[in-house]
Image: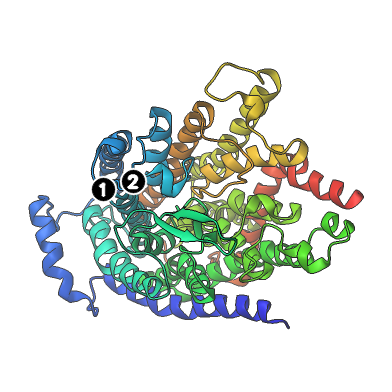
């Protein structure tokens, strides 16, 4: 086994070993048990007092949802105003301009919904003020929003009959003060000591090895890079994201960033088991998600390490063919691993260019976002998986001739309608968006917009279609990565993807919250010998089959037109 593979295996093993105690700690935080960070309680009480929050008032699922949507709307307005006026505000040593209205619309929504799609270039498109007080701020609160929504579902699963599911603002605040902020500080310090900038100086002049003088952007990047990964946000301080040597200076930082971006998604799975006292159930979920990850990861790493046959056919050695577009400092295996974990969760950060990935790798990256429930983002990954659990329970109940039950509650028509709508929504917004963009490109290539549709794509044919499909898939999955051969900073893409971002974020939160809230108020039925157990390997495989079948039925035709066709055309020649 070569050292590249050992590094990948070690990275995943470290992630799991850290996630288990972190999951236990998270469960204690939300169960109001004693933890090592209880000294922060006076700060939390001060926040609650000045914000007028009654911590003793519990909310039902509708009140939680109202609180979540209302405060998110306020953050959108705040972000829009600052981004639209950033060029004339302070903390702008490089003199970067304000964003256009359509780019402001897209960027504010993107960071609000934890996607961090960047149609601007990081160091030249934003100022220190907006990087810190818009993007950094939204990275914390968007991650906390997802976790808070999941904890509401935890409460609904834990209690037998209730409509009191905790207080959204208390859960939200503790997520930041007890989890996100302390861990981000530790990560940022490690990044700073390994060469990531953390100053407010402007661009610096350096002389390259070729003797050229170039201007290199700097800034207080370490803090943003820490929360961008921990909160599964993914937006880079620099335009090249974690492929930039200042954002990801060495192998240690590369491993650190790969670990922390998957840490909370996996920790929340274990936290579920500790929180509702069903550890076996959480192990089954972890097993299914890990099998799903390996389904995508193994073909990707094989494709990336074997290299591009077209490059090899040109007389270039196989090793060089494997490193085209990859992070040559760390190897093709590390690039392949990063590309899959960043797309199955909602991080979307990159340490190599996905547009340079082999067609099979691009297919797996797309499929990871299309499934959108293997680990997933902070909180929302399990929320997406929860929908598939409901569907799997219903199908399993029909197969054995019993009324479907999940954790002592009957799954009936109302819950199934919601689950089905949410499951169908994801492919709907992706495929409709891709169809509209394809139609516009073919029939109106020279439309008089800011950028003509004929100039959108740098790559024609199958790969060009994949670039458009990838953009809407990334937005619907709140991922933010892209096949960057696409020219996306224009009115069409900023506006259309903006609406996909909104639908792809909030409806998959509304659906699970509604289902969990409805089930929590139903009569509790104790488990018996005839109860369908959801903590077994058999049910886990059933859920995996449901996830993959739904994804295949919805997306296979589109994948055939893009990465699959490109794969066969590449090897045919």
Residue 374: x, y in percent? 56, 60
Circles 1 and 2, Cβ within 8 Å, touching? The answer is yes
Q: Which residue is more in the foreground, 557 or 532? A: 557
Identify the secondary structure beneath mark 1: loop
Identify the secondary structure beneath mark 2: loop
Q: In the image, is 382 to the left or to the right of 367?
A: left
Residue 329: x, y in percent? 61, 70
Residue at numbered disc 1: 91
Q: Quadrant of the N terminus?
A: bottom right
Dot 1 surroundings within 10 Å: few (below 14), some, or many (20 or more)? some
Residue at numbered disc 2: 127
Q: Which mark is residue 516?
A: none
Q: Is residue 346 visible?
A: no
Which residue in the rendered view is the most extreme toward the front?
Answer: 211
| Vertical placement of residue 41 versus 412, above or below | below
Whole-number angstrom distance, CA of label 1 to CA of label 2: 7 Å
Identify which residue is drawn at 62% across, 46% down: 483
């Amino acid at each position: 086994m070569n050292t590249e593979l050992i590094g990948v295996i070690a990275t995943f093993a470290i992630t799991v070993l850290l996630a288990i105690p972190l999951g236990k700690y998270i469960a204690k935080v939300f169960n109001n048990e004693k933890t090592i960070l209880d000294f922060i309680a006076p700060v939390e009480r001060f926040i609650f007092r000045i914000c007028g929050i009654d911590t003793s008032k519990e909310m039902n699922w509708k009140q939680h949802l109202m609180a979540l949507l209302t405060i998110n709307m306020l953050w959108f307005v705040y972000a829009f105003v600052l981004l639209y006026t950033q060029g004339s505000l302070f903390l702008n040593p490089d003199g970067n301009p304000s964003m256009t209205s359509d780019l402001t619309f897209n960027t504010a929504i993107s960071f609000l919904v934890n996607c961090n799609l960047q149609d601007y270039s990081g160091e030249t498109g934003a100022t220190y003020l907006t990087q810190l007080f818009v993007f950094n701020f939204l990275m914390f609160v968007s991650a906390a929003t997802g976790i808070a929504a999941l904890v509401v579902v935890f409460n609904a699963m834990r209690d037998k009959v209730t409509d009191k599911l905790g207080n959204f603002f208390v859960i939200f605040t503790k997520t930041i003060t007890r989890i996100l902020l302390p861990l981000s500080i530790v990560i940022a310090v490690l990044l700073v000591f390994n060469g990531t900038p953390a100053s407010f100086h402007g661009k610096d002049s350096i002389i390259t090895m070729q003797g050229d003088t170039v201007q290199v952007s700097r800034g207080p990047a370490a803090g943003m890079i820490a929360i961008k990964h921990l909160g599964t946000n993914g937006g880079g301080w620099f335009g090249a994201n974690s492929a930039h040597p200042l954002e990801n200076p060495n192998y240690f930082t590369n491993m650190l960033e790969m670990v922390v971006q998957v840490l909370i998604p996996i920790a929340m799975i274990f936290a579920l088991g500790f929180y509702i006292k069903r550890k076996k159930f959480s192990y089954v979920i972890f097993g299914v998600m890990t099998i799903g990850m390996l389904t995508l990861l193994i073909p990707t790493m094989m494709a990336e390490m074997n290299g591009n046959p077209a490059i090899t056919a040109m007389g270039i050695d196989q090793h060089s063919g494997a490193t085209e577009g990859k992070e040559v400092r760390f190897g093709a295996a590390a690039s392949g691993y990063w590309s899959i974990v960043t797309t199955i969760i909602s991080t979307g950060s990159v340490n190599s260019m996905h547009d340079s990935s082999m067609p099979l790798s691009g297919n797996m990256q797309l499929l990871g976002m299309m499934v959108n429930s293997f680990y997933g983002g902070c909180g929302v990954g399990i929320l997406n998986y929860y929908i598939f659990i409901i569907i799997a329970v219903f199908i399993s109940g029909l197969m054995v001739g019993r009324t479907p039950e999940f954790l002592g509650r009957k799954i009936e028509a109302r819950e199934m309608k919601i689950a089905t709508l949410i499951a169908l929504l994801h492919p709907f917004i992706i495929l409709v968006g891709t169809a509209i963009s394809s139609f516009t490109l073919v029939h109106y290539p020279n439309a008089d917009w800011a950028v003509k549709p004929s100039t959108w794509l740098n790559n024609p044919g199958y790969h060009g279609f994949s670039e458009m499909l990838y953009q809407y898939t990334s937005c619907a999955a709140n991922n933010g990565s892209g096949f960057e051969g696409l020219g996306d900073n224009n009115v069409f893409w900023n506006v259309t993807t903006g609406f996909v971002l909104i639908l792809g974020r909030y409806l998959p939160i509304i659906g699970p919250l509604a289902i969990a809230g409805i089930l929590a108020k139903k009569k509790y039925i104790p488990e018996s010998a005839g109860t369908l157990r959801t903590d077994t390997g058999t049910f886990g495989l059933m859920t995996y089959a449901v996830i993959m079948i739904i994804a295949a039925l919805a997306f296979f035709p589109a994948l055939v037109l893009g990465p699959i066709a490109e794969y066969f055309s590449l090897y045919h020649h």
